Image (cartoon, rainbow, N blue to C red):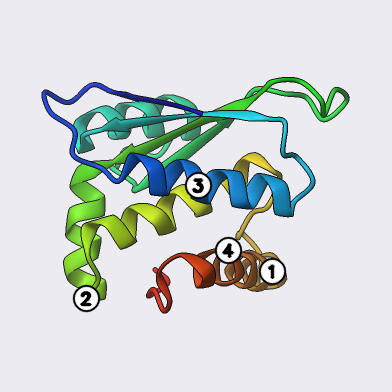
Amino acid sequence: MQIETTLPTLDVPREALVESICRVLKGEGRDHAAVTMIFIDDAYIRRLNREYRHLDRATDVLSFKMDDDTTPDQDLLGEIYISMDRARDQAVRYHVSVDEELQRLVVHGCLHLLGYDHHRTAERRVMRQKEAHYLSSDTGSISEG
């Protein structure tokens, strides 16, 4: 696991976030995959969202899958971009700590890398259940946004 940032300072629970990703990967049968987490601000994630998803707004997390499913043993699964601005705002909105919200976003982003989505109701239900499962052993009850 690798952690990067474009921010001048970064205060995140690195070990806990890496453990969360490892838990998801192992639970989904991909314990040899690597993930890069990149912590950025709203302006940066808005540019990415506009360029890759054609949505001109900031979002909390974007995932970019690097493997092509034909080589599941490939080392780099993908990159997860997390907006620290969104994480802080959502922590307040959901009445959780920033660290708890970062845990949720990392798990959510990792599930996207593994092919889970939430565009349809059934997909959303499965993804929320997976999130709850992987977060339950981390921090107890975390609000889902």
Q: Mark 4 against mark 1, which lies toward the viewer?
A: 4
First in sequence: mark 1 vs mark 3: 3
Horizontal relation, residue 64 to residue 67: left or right: left
Q: Are marks 2 and 3 in contact (CB under 8 Å)?
A: no
Badge 2 marks a residue whose secondary structure is: loop
x, y percent for residue 79: 51, 28
Which residue is labeled 4 in the image? 134
State the mark number for residue 25. Answer: none
Residue type at mark 3 is Glu
C-alpha distance separating marks 4 and 3: 11 Å
First in sequence: mark 4 vs mark 1: 1
Q: Mark 2 against mark 1, which lies toward the viewer?
A: 2
Which residue is labeled 1 in the image? 126
Name the quadrant containing residue 118.
Answer: bottom right
Which residue ends up furthest to the front in the rendered image?
15
First in sequence: mark 4 vs mark 3: 3
